Image: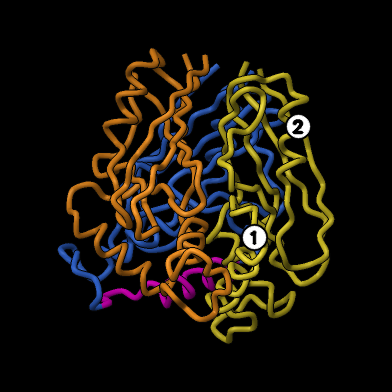
Chain colours: A yellow, B blue, C orange
Amino acid sequence: MTTQHELQVNTNGRGTYDLTSDVQDIVRASGVNSGMCHVFVCHTSASLILCENADPSVRTDLETFMSRQVRDGDPMFTHTAEGPDDMPAHVRSVLTQSDLNLPVRDARCALGTWQGIYLWEHRYAPHKRRIIVTIQGS
Amino acid sequence: MTTQHELQVNTNGRGTYDLTSDVQDIVRASGVNSGMCHVFVCHTSASLILCENADPSVRTDLETFMSRQVRDGDPMFTHTAEGPDDMPAHVRSVLTQSDLNLPVRDARCALGTWQGIYLWEHRYAPHKRRIIVTIQGS
Amino acid sequence: MTTQHELQVNTNGRGTYDLTSDVQDIVRASGVNSGMCHVFVCHTSASLILCENADPSVRTDLETFMSRQVRDGDPMFTHTAEGPDDMPAHVRSVLTQSDLNLPVRDARCALGTWQGIYLWEHRYAPHKRRIIVTIQGS
C-alpha cells in the first residue's frame, strides 16, 4: 500500500520548523501499521534534518555552525542573482538532506526519544515550501 | 511491485553529471504510477546530490566550496595511496549522499521545478560508475 | 512484505563500528530477494555512513577531518550541558546520515565492492545505540 500527502509550510525566513506532529498525523491517518515513511522537500534552498528536539539551543548552535561554515555573501560564489543567501542556501541543502526515510512501527514513525523532524529554511525571505510525504507498508 | 535497473556512467573526472532524464525514463518504463524511486551509487568516491538545475554556476560554486572545505593533498590525510584526491573523495562522499529516495507520482519522480539529480564524481580520473535504480509501488 | 528488526550496538565511545555483516544477516534471514533495506539510528549524536571498507586509515582520516571541521569545546556552542562533545555530536550527525537506504538484490544489500555500513559514534563515552532495520520487497 502506498499513500501520498502534500504539506505546505509557510516559512518566516531562515530557521528551523518542526514537522514532527504533522508527519506523525499523516502516518496515523494512512492506516499503515508497519513500513516506511518518506519525507521529501521539493526545493534546493531548504532542507530536512533529524535533530535533538528538547533544547532549542541545539538548533540555534546548528545555525551558528552552518553560518560560519557557509558564509553568506562569500566572494567565492558567482551565483548571486537572488542575493548573498542564494548560493549558501544551495550549499546548505546539499550538506544536509532533501529526503528523510523513517521506519513506521505501530502506526507511527519509530523516532528515538530525542529525534524531531525539522524543515530548515535557508533563505532570509519567507517562502512557501512543498513537502511530499509517502508511506508504504501494511 | 519492485523493479531494479542498473545504469553505468562513464565520467570524465571530477564534476557533476545530470542523471535526471535517465532516472525519469526508468521510472516511466517501470509501470509504477505511485510509489518510491531509489537511486544508489555503488562507490565511496562519487556521490549523488539533488541540485538546482537551471544555472550551471550553482554546480561550479558547489565545487569551489567543496574544494576549499576538503583540500586535495591536505597533509592531515594519511590514506594517500591513489593520490591527493583519494581521501578527499571519500570525505566528499560522506558529506553528501550515496543514495537518494524520490517520491513517484503520476509515473514520474515528483521533483520540484528546480531539482535535478546529479552524480558527483570526486576523483580527477575518468571512472565507470555503477548506479542501481529501484522502484517500488503500484 | 515488510520485516523489521532492531539491533543494539554498545559503543566504546567515539569511532566507527562496522554493521555490514549484521545488516546482511538480517536481509538474508528476511526472505526478501529483491527490494530495499533501510537502516535507521534512533539517536541524534551518532550517525550512519557508507565508507570504504578495505583500509582502516580512511576512517581514521575521516575522524581527523571531522574533528577539525567541528571542534570539540568550540566557544561558539551554547548547548554544552553534557560536555565539549555534546553539540559537536549533534552537528556531526546532521552533516552525515541518520538513515541509509540500500537496494536488495539476490537476497543481500547490493553494496559496491568497497562499501561498508558503519555506525559513527560521536560521543566520547560508551553508549547503547538502537538501530532499526526495515526490509521491504518480495
Q: Residue at x 32, y 19 (%)?
A: C28
What amino acid type should be assigned to the residue bearing mark 2?
A: Ile
In the picture, measured across the screen, residue C123 lies left or right of residue A2, that is left
Q: How many marks?
A: 2
Confirm whether residue B41 shows in the render: yes
Task: Specify start and end residues of the magenta stretch as a single range.
Answer: B56-74
Q: Residue at x 55, y 57 (%)?
A: A96
**Element at badge 1?**
loop
Q: Residue at x 52, y 69 (%)?
A: C80
Confirm whether residue C106 shows in the render: no
What amino acid type should be assigned to the residue bearing mark 1?
A: Asp
Q: Earlier in the sequence, mark 1 or mark 2?
A: 2
Give the Cα separation between the discs numbered 1 and 2.
25 Å
Q: Are marks 1 and 2 on the same chain?
A: yes
Name the residue nearer the viewer: C61 or B119. Answer: C61
Name the residue nearer the viewer: B60 or A107. Answer: A107
What residue is shown with label 1?
A: A55
Give how far across and how far down residue B52 sits, in percent. Answer: 63, 59
What residue is shown with label 2?
A: A26
Give how far across and how far down residue A52 sits, in percent. Answer: 59, 54
**Element at badge 2?**
helix
Main SS of residues in magenta = helix
Give how far across and how far down residue B36 sits, in percent. Answer: 60, 31
Give how far across and how far down residue B117 sits, in percent. Answer: 55, 49
- Badge 1 density bin: few <14, some 14–19, many ≥20, Cα 10 Å: few
Q: Residue furthest front?
A: C81
